[in-house]
Amino acid sequence: MKTITSLFLILALAVFSSCEGPMGPPGFDGEDGEDGTSLLGSVFEIEGDFTEANGYELYYEFPSNFEIYETDIVMVYILWDVADGGNGSTLDVWRPLPQTIVLDDGVIQYNFDYTIADVKVFMDFTVSELLPAETDDQVFRIAVLPADWAMDKSVDINSLNSVMKSLEVNPNTLKKFSLTK
C-alpha cells in the first residue's frame, strides 16, 4: 500500500510541477529619474618639476566636477622609462609609487599621499645633489578606483596597463595637467 501511495504522490508531483499558467499583466513603469554616475574609475596625468621652491612636492587638486569617495582607492604611477617598441615606436614604462632609487651617496624615493580633495606626489632623498633627470619633467598618472572594482582579483592595480585596459581608458584621451609654472 505504501508503494502505491508513494508512486501516486510522485506522479502527482510530476504532473503539477510541469503546469504553467497564462502570463500575468506587465508591471507599471517606474518614475524617470536622473542618470546615475559611473562607478568606474578615472585616470589623470600630471607633469611637473620637483624643486626646492615647491618643497619637492607636486600638488594636484581634483577638479570640482569630479567626485571621489572615502572608500575609493588612489594609485599613482611614475613614467619610469621609455623603451624601444620596435619599428620606430616607443613604449612607456610605468611603475606604481612608492619607488626607491639607491645610489652610492644616498637614497631617492618618490611617494604620494591623498585625500578626497587632492593628491600630493613628493620626493624624499638623502643624496647631496639631485640631477635634472630625477627632478625635471616628471610624469605621473593618478588612477582613482572604486574599492569594489579594485578588489576584483582579475585586475592587477600595481600595473597601470592592466588598470587602464580594465577601465577601458585610451591613453590618447587622458586629461593632462602641467604643474610647472
Image: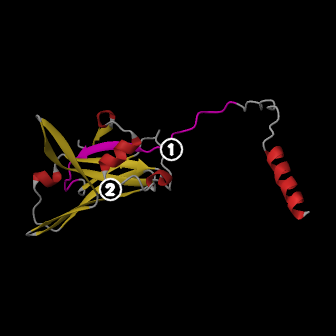
Q: Which amino acid type is marked by label 1?
A: Leu
Q: How is the image coloured?
A: secondary structure
Which is nearer the N-term, disc 1 or disc 2?
Answer: 1
In this rendering, the answer to whether 55 lies above or below 104 is: above
- Name the residue at the right extreme: 1
Residue 64 falls left or right of residue 60: right
Res 158 label: 2
Instruction: Report if residue 49 lies within the magenta region.
Output: yes
Residue in the foreground of this view, choosing between 140 and 121: 140
Label 2 secondary element: loop
Please state the extent of the stretch shown in magenta in the rendering.
Answer: 32-53
Q: Which amino acid type is marked by label 2?
A: Asn
Residue in the foreground of this view, choosing between 86 and 122: 86
- What residue do we see at 78% from left, 42% from top? 18
How far is the residue under mark 1 from the one under mark 2? Answer: 20 Å
Estimate how packed mark 1 is, as few (under 14), some (14 to 19) or many (20 or more) residues with alpha carbons within 10 Å. few
What secondary structure characterizes most of the magenta part?
loop
Check disc 1 and report the residue beneath it: 39
Can you give x and y, in whole percent of width and height, for residue 24 in the image? 81, 32
Can you give x and y, in whole percent of width and height, for residue 169 in the image? 36, 38
- What residue do we see at 9% from left, 69% from top? 105
Can you give x and y, in whole percent of width and height, for residue 80 in the image? 19, 51
Give the image quarter of residue 86: top left
In the rendered image, which quarter contains the N terminus? bottom right
